[in-house]
Image (spheres, helix red, strand yellow):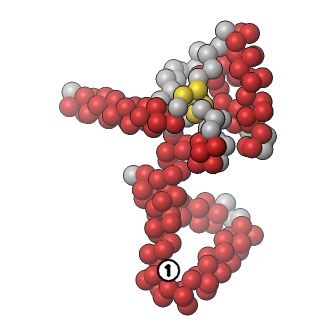
Amino acid sequence: GPPALLPLYFQWYIFYFVIQRKKWVDLAWMVTFYTRIFLSYVPLLGLKGFLGLFFIVRFLESNWFVWVTQMNHIPMHIDHDRNMDWVSTQLQATCNVHKSAFNDWFSGHLNFQIEHHLFPTMPRHNYHKVAPLVQSLCAKHGIEYQSKPLLSAFADIVYSLKESGQLWLDAYLHQ
């Protein structure tokens, strides 16, 4: 799954999406990007070396992408729409990972996922500035604001996947 997500699926699907939607300018830019990267690296590394480098980088990127995006979403318990207001729904669906120089760098400031969901157009490096305001708003209205350490967030991913895998297995075996 995740290790092959970007190297294979996304690369193919992006081209499929652009062609299906007849986004010819986007397709031209994509082709020029891949042509330039091919012409830059193949003379240095050869075709096999280029493909190896390309897929290793995409493999690492894919794993990073999955951990960073899922640490704020998978562990959250989201019920069907209970007619909650938009802010409460966003706070229920996401959590933050504590601020630190490493966490900010590693996640590209997406450790502030609550703020990212509430203010999607705000530059990510400013999320830490608005976080205290969101926390005080949550405290004022009795809404839970969740933030956890990075390793706890990673452990929650593994636990949630194990739990959902067990539910799937139980459902499959009892059919």
> Residue 66: x, y in percent?
50, 47
Q: What secondary structure is found at the residue carrying circle 1?
A: helix
The residue that appears at 66% across and 75% down in the rendered structure is: 33
- Can residue 142 be seen here? The reply is yes
User: In the image as oriented, which residue stretches furthest toward the left?
Assistant: 173
The residue that appears at 63% across and 66% down in the rendered structure is: 19
* Mark 1 Cα-neighbour bin, 10 Å: few <14, some 14–19, many ≥20: some
The residue wearing badge 1 is: 50
Task: Locate the C terminus by quadrant.
Answer: top left
Observer-nearest of 130 and 75: 130
Q: Is 26 displayed left or right of 147 in the figure?
A: right
> Residue 106: x, y in percent?
58, 48
Amino acid type at mark 1? Phe
Up-down relation of residue 2 to residue 18 (above or below) = above
Q: Is 25 displayed left or right of 110 in the figure?
A: right
> Residue 22: x, y in percent?
69, 65
- Can residue 175 be seen here? The reply is no
> Residue 114: x, y in percent?
66, 30
The residue that appears at 29% across and 31% down in the rendered structure is: 166
Quadrant for residue 98, please give it: top right
The residue that appears at 26% across and 33% down in the rendered structure is: 169
Observer-nearest of 63 and 171: 63
How many discs appear? 1
